[in-house]
Amino acid sequence: MTKSINYFLQNLWKRSLLTFPKLPQLQVYTSKTLAFIRAWNYLSAAKIDGDYLEFGVYEGASFDLSLRAAAKFFKNTSPSAPRFFAFDSFKGLPDLDPQKDKKELFFKGEYSADQQKFMKNIRRAAKEWNIHIIPGFYESSLTSDIYQKFDLTSAAFVTIDCDLYTSTKEVLKFLAPIIKSGTLLFFDDWYSSGGDMTLGEAGACHEWLKQNPTLSLLDFGRVGVMGKLFIVNRASSES
């Protein structure tokens, strides 16, 4: 009798989950929230200092999440508190590479967002944190001048939500001098290539690693449906 009741309840629960209309979105949001809390917990526990950089902020949902998660483990008044950098064209995606991107998934101009709306959406979470916004397409905005202007020498946590191969390639090239062993890299669309890991964010990353043999990535878990977290290992160039 007990087994029958348990079986009935288990199946009732399964059916209720499968018919819940917002379950896929709820799973993604929950997974990402827990992943970002885990990420900032790791940075705190492992004593990884440096700044947070997000590429492709859109309207600010992930940026807001990172600010709130960071506040659980870091004090914004501390001299070693991370700064938060937002990079976005605010004009949507640039041209796709027909050989390196899946045109079925993305299109030029997609994810266009108003910068003022982004700032409004993060306003509460950003209170008393040091925030910098760098607008523009990456091919022109990601210059070496940024390192000097902001004294940007160390990235602790990087969110890459570029979607496209060329954009990701530009971002990784920019990051190479400022990442270190312990840096977290989060690719929001790692699996969007549909198994062809020469495309999109994953394709750009694999090429980047070949060009930077002292760098390797340690698996730190999947996030939602498409996302992936890695911990950077930077070997000595002399080894």
Image (tube, grey):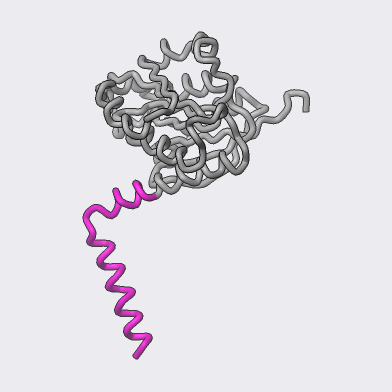
Q: Nearer the viewer, residue 193 or 59?
A: 59
Q: Is residue 156 above or below residue 115?
A: below
Label tally: 0
Residue 205, visible in the rendered structure: no
Residue 44, image quadrant = top right
Report the residue that reaches farthest toward the right. Answer: 239
Residue 38, percent from left and from top: 50, 46
What is the span of residues highlighted in magenta in the rendered image?
Answer: 1-30
Q: Is residue 12 magenta?
A: yes
Q: Main secondary structure of the magenta part?
A: helix
Q: Nearer the viewer, residue 176 or 148?
A: 148
Q: Quadrant of the N terminus?
A: bottom left
Query: Residue at 28% of width from left, 55% of height from top?
Result: 23
Query: Residue at 54% of width from left, 30% of height from top?
Result: 78
Residue 120, percent from left and from top: 27, 27
Residue 182, percent from left and from top: 61, 35
Report the residue that reaches farthest toward the top. Answer: 145
Q: Is residue 136 magenta?
A: no
Residue 49, image quadrant = top right
Query: Residue at 40% of width from left, 45% of height from top?
Result: 32
Residue 125, visible in the rendered structure: yes
Q: Nearer the viewer, residue 3 or 39?
A: 39
Q: In this image, 47 relative to 117: left or right?
A: right
Q: Is residue 76 above or below residue 225?
A: above
Q: In this image, 70 relative to 232: left or right?
A: left
Report the residue that reaches farthest toward the front. Answer: 77
Q: In this image, 117 relative to 6: left or right?
A: left
Q: Nearer the viewer, residue 26 or 153?
A: 153
Q: Is residue 143 above or below residue 108?
A: above
Q: Quadrant of the C terminus?
A: top right
Query: Residue at 43% of width from left, 48% of height from top?
Result: 34
